[in-house]
Image (spheres, grey):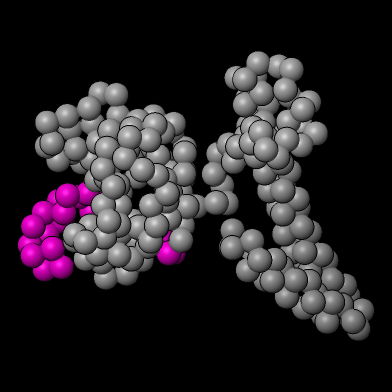
C-alpha cells in the first residue's frame, strides 16, 4: 500500500481517551489529494471545530456513509453529487491529530460503525496525484481545455472516450515504467561489465563502474525507490 496504516480500526489509545478507534488512519503528507471511494452525495462537511478537524461525510446509495477526517481543505459542499474518484479535498493535520494523516471511517445506514479496513487499499490507490487512475481522463474531458486528443475522441461515445483515455494513461505509465526498468537494469549490467573489464586489466573500468552505480542510485532516488 502507498500509505502506512498508522491507526487500526478498534484500536485503543490514550490519544482517543481509550475509546475504540472508529476508523483507520493512513499517514500521508499534508496536501495529498483525496477522492471519493464511490458514487454518492456529500451529506456533512466538518468545519474543523470538532476532534475530527476539517472533513466530510459522503452518503452512498445503500445508506452507508464514508467519513474523511483531519483534512487541510474540503473542496466540496453539502448536497454535492460525487462520482467515484472525484476530488473531495486535501489531507492535513487538523483537529485531534498528532501528525499528518487521513482518518477514514464507515457507518451503516443506521449510524453503526463499520470496519473500513477492507477499503484501505482502494482508498490509498485513489489518493495522491501520481498514480490516480483516470487522471488523464479528467484532463481529456475538461471541456474548457479541449486538446487535440479530446477532439479526436469527441465523436465516439462518452464511455468509449473514457476507456480510450484510461487505456492511454495505462500505456503511458507502462512505457515510463518499462523505460525506468530498462535504465535501472542497464546501469547495473553496465557496471558489472566494466568491473569485469577492470579485472581483465582495463585501467578505467573501476571508475566508470562507479559512475554507473552512482547513476543507478540517483535514478532510484529520483523514481522514489523501486
Ligand atoms: Zn483515526
Q: Position of residue 105 (x, y in %)?
A: 24, 45
Residue at horizontal 79%, vertical 77%? 211
Task: Give the extent of the magenta segment.
Answer: 1-30
* Residue 73 in the figure: left or right of residue 167: left
Residue 8 lies in the magenta stretch? yes
Residue at 73% x, 30% y: name it. 150
Secondary structure predominantly adopted by residues drawn in magenta: loop
Asked if one can make out residue 185 in the rendered structure from this viewpoint, the answer is no
- At which x and y percent is residue 125? 46, 45
| Residue 136 drawn above or below residue 33 | above
Question: In this view of the protein, which residue sits in the foreground, 168 or 63?
Answer: 63
Residue found farthest to the right: 202
User: Residue 92's spot in the image, x, y percent?
Assistant: 37, 62
State the residue in front, 204 or 167.
167
Residue drawn at 39 percent across, 57 percent down: 73
Q: Is residue 200 above or below residue 148?
A: below
User: Which is nearer the eye, 133 or 174?
Assistant: 133
Q: Position of residue 86 (x, y in %)?
A: 47, 39
Amino acid at each position: 500500500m502507498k500509505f502506512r496504516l498508522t491507526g487500526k480500526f478498534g484500536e485503543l489509545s490514550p490519544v482517543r481517551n481509550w475509546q475504540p478507534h472508529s476508523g483507520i488512519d493512513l499517514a500521508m503528507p499534508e496536501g495529498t489529494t483525496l477522492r471519493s471511494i464511490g458514487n454518492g452525495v456529500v451529506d456533512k462537511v466538518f468545519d474543523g471545530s470538532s476532534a475530527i478537524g476539517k472533513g466530510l461525510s459522503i452518503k452512498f446509495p445503500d445508506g452507508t456513509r464514508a467519513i474523511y477526517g483531519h483534512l487541510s481543505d474540503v473542496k466540496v459542499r453539502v448536497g454535492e453529487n460525487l462520482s467515484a474518484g472525484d476530488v473531495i479535498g486535501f489531507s492535513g493535520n487538523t483537529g485531534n491529530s498528532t501528525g499528518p494523516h487521513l482518518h477514514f471511517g464507515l457507518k451503516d445506514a443506521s449510524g453503526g460503525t463499520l470496519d473500513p479496513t477492507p477499503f484501505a487499499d482502494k482508498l490509498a490507490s485513489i489518493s495522491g496525484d501520481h498514480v490516480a487512475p483516470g487522471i488523464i481522463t479528467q484532463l481529456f474531458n475538461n471541456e474548457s481545455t479541449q486538446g487535440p486528443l479530446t477532439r479526436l475522441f469527441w465523436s465516439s461515445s462518452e464511455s468509449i472516450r473514457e476507456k480510450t483515455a484510461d487505456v492511454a494513461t495505462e500505456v503511458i505509465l507502462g512505457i515510463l515504467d518499462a523505460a525506468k526498468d530498462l535504465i535501472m537494469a542497464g546501469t547495473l549490467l553496465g557496471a558489472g561489465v566494466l568491473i569485469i573489464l577492470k579485472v581483465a586489466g582495463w585501467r578505467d573500468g573501476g571508475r566508470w563502474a562507479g559512475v554507473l552505480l552512482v547513476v543507478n542510485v540517483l535514478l532510484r532516488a529520483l523514481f522514489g525507490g523501486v
